[in-house]
């Protein structure tokens, strides 16, 4: 019984460590994006198209920047294993 408990504890510890590294990856991606806003601009074609699409389906859609979209994409992909939809992006950035 103690071997099973030790194994489960090890798995839980591994999951916690992995989740922390995913958060660090997302933080580094956002920091890098924000450091290049002056050079690359606040928005790009992808963020503009995403905002237009979300505005069509959600009347109260708040326009998000390129870096916010990158942050939401990272959170949804690495941390939550979820799809990139308007509602999921809204929840990820809340």
Image (spheres, rainbow, N blue to C red):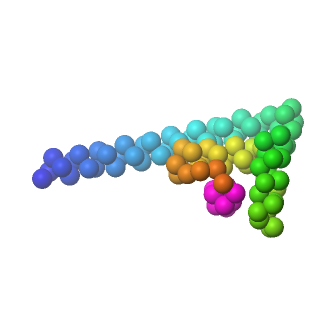
Q: Is residue 93 visible?
A: no
- Quadrant in which the C terminus is drawn: bottom right
Q: Main secondary structure of the magenta part?
A: helix
Q: Where's residue 66, x and y in %?
A: 78, 44
| Residue closest to the eye, 64 or 15 | 64
Q: Is residue 68 magenta?
A: no
At a point 66% along the width and 37% down the height, the residue shown is 29
Q: Where's residue 3, x and y in %?
A: 15, 47
Which of the 4 image quadrants contains residue 34?
A: top right
Q: Provide the residue span drawn in magenta.
A: 86-94
At a point 35% along the width and 46% down the height, the residue shown is 13
**Above-or-below relation of 56 to 36:** below
Q: Where's residue 93, x and y in %?
A: 67, 56
At a point 70% along the width and 39% down the height, the residue shown is 31
Q: Is residue 93 magenta?
A: yes
At a point 58% along the width and 38% down the height, the residue shown is 25
Considering every residue shown, the one lying at the far top of the view is: 39
* Number of callouts: 0
Q: Where's residue 53, x and y in %?
A: 78, 54
Is 89 placed left or right of 81 in the picture?
right
Q: Is residue 10 visible?
A: yes
């Amino acid at each position: 019984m103690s071997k099973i408990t030790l194994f489960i504890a090890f798995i839980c510890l591994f999951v916690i460590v992995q989740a922390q590294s995913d958060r660090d990856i997302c933080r580094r991606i956002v920091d890098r994006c924000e450091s290049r806003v002056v050079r690359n601009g606040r928005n790009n074609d992808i963020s503009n198209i995403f905002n237009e699409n979300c505005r069509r389906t959600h009347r109260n859609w708040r326009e998000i920047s390129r870096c916010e979209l990158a942050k939401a994409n990272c959170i949804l992909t690495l941390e939550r294993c979820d799809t990139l939809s308007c509602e999921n992006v809204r929840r990820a950035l809340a």
